[in-house]
Image (tube, coloured by chain):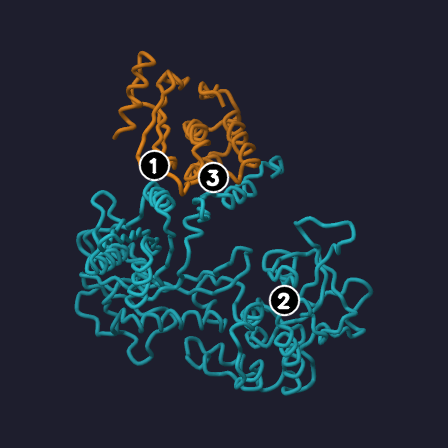
Amino acid sequence: MTAQSEPSACVWLQMLCAKVGGHLDKFDSRCSDGVFLGYALNSRGFHVWNLDTKQVVETCEVSFDKTMPCSTPVFELSGDDELGASIFEEEEDAPEDGDGGTTTCAADPTPSETSDDDYIPPITSTTTIDVPSTLEGPAADAGEVTSRATGSRAVQWDHPSERIIGDIGSRTLRSQTGSVAFFAHFGFVASFEPKDVGHALSDSHWVNAMHEELENFERNQVWKLVEPPPQCNPIGTKWVFKNKQDADGVVVRNKARLVAQGFCQKEGIDYEETFAHVARLESIRILLALAASKGFKLFQMDVKSAFLNGFIEEEVYVKQPPGFENPKFPNRVFKLQKALYGLKQAPRAWYDRLKKFLIGKGFKMGSVDKTLFLLSHGNDLLFVQIYVDDIIFGGSHALVSKFAEQMSSEFEMSMMGELQYFLGLQIKQMKEGTFIHQAKYTKDLIRKYNFGGDLKP
Amino acid sequence: MSSSGGLDKDEDGVAVDQKEYQGMIGSLLYLTATRPDILFATGLCARFQAFPRESHLKTVKRNFRYLTHTSELGLFYSAASSIQLCGYSDADYAGCKLDRKSTSGTCHFLGSSLVSWSSRKQSGVALSTSEAKYVAAASCCS
């Protein structure tokens, strides 16, 4: 199973998919070319990379173009001709290194597989993007075995060189990665969401995601493995799996998060207060209006694994994560030094950490709104508004860049940029002013409650 | 929608799925973050969440029909705006058909930018329009 879902396993087909939206002239082409990427998870459609829009779409309105051999570069429209073509070449070459019996390229219209009009690649039993005819031989077997070794790090190590796409030594320019990054990426994510740990451990992508989370813990020095003290009642831990999707609903990241089962905690014994700091919408709007009238731009940033940054005052012990128990000390427990997602005191601990950091940098906390921080430096002003792990900030140019620097040196930031999308509000900052609306949310609502098709947008 | 709304308990009406009705109200309430124009209508429909009937669902649907054609509306904060805070208030008189209480509406502008607004049924029964408006003005300043 896993052997087939390895990165080398992308199917390249040329296909036509109906052009949607936009104004079309009488003689304009009604279709656009696309590349077949895989099968949709919840419908009978396909995942298609639309070469015109450079986006991945899920559609069933396609016709497979079997006249076009897959090795023909279909990247004529893209600026990355060479890289695209080189991927195809690698795709064709790769299987020859293995047993040589079958070919990875499903687009090759062999007469036995093609009927007349609608040629559809056969569906195999895998959950991710598959090659209908799989690699055979030692490489595939090795992949199969290691993926079953649950929780073992061997999964990460086993990458036979013949199964790596492209030349490892060659350099990739940043400009080249743009549209192709997606292809490379698509082979690296699992498209399902496991319900429990056992299910997740059977897929190498999810094992990787879990390793990533645990490495995150190590890096942040979240916990220490200790002998359980007497009368300690360690809190259970649980894995939560979530697929991150982009705006078009395509899975872009597998996210595994280890959470503590905080519902076992008792108020007054295990924690004193629980509290999450959210900003009021009014104060966000006032900040937007003020920024527009004062003529400064607002930016947003997002702290990666924010709650893992908070120091906790209480002594908390948690059990070892399921599937990743230490084989030498299965009975030991982890003593927490920082908060874990799910703990009752986690949001508060994070707020305290951030508050101390900001006040240490000379910020003043708002007297009414405790989530607004203000830094004044002569005539220069900097506003910082906190919404749990989202931070909006803006002000004088010098202070803004200094603040961004300070934050990224103290915490790990995952996203930084102009404020565009926040809590479902779409924000457009222009010279003449700022426009905020919820068009996307409204349209999603109308789609959700369509009253049996009565509501037509 | 007129302020009298024409909505009452409609006890003889056909009951509809309460969970879905509440879900719609919740979604609409979040939409009021940038849409003060639907605040009153949403608030009115929200009063019937305990026992939603077909007539109430029809009103919610009417709200959605309005939204389908106005989904792009939002708030504009002009760069030329001053930052002078200014509040306005108004009230209807005995707008609620059930208990004859009035509804106050308030809004606050920062220069020309609308930053805060509310629409609430008053807690007591006002005996005159001036009393209703006085209560609204008081709630605007707090």
Residue A205 vertical placement versus A440 (above, below): below
Q: Both on one chain, marks 1 and 3?
A: yes
Amino acid type of the residue tagged 1 in the rendering: Leu
Q: Which mark is residue B74?
A: 3
Name the residue that disc number 1 marks: B110
Q: Residues within 10 Å of mark 3 (few under 14, many from 20)?
A: many
Shown in cyan, the chain is A
Helix, strand, or loop for circle 1?
A: strand
Residue A86 to residue A322: above or below:
below
> Considering only vertical position in the picture, is B49 above or below A321?
above
- Residues at badges 3 and 2 in contact (C-beta under 8 Å)? no
Q: Colour of chain B?
A: orange
Give the number of the mark in front: 3 or 2: 3
In the rendered structure, the residue with mark 1 lies on which chain? B
- Answer with left or right where residue A368 lies relative to residue A109: left
- Residue type highlighted by circle 3: Gly
Q: Quadrant of the C terminus of chain B?
A: top left
Q: Measured from the top left, where is residue A451 in percent x and y?
A: 58, 36
Q: Position of residue B33 (x, y in %)?
A: 41, 39
Q: Earlier in the sequence, mark 1 or mark 3?
A: 3
In the image, A87: left or right of A202?
Answer: right
Q: Residue at x 61, y 58 (%)?
A: A57
Q: Is residue A372 visible?
A: yes
How far across and down, in percent of the image, does residue B118 sit? 36, 31
Q: Which residue is mark 2?
A: A37
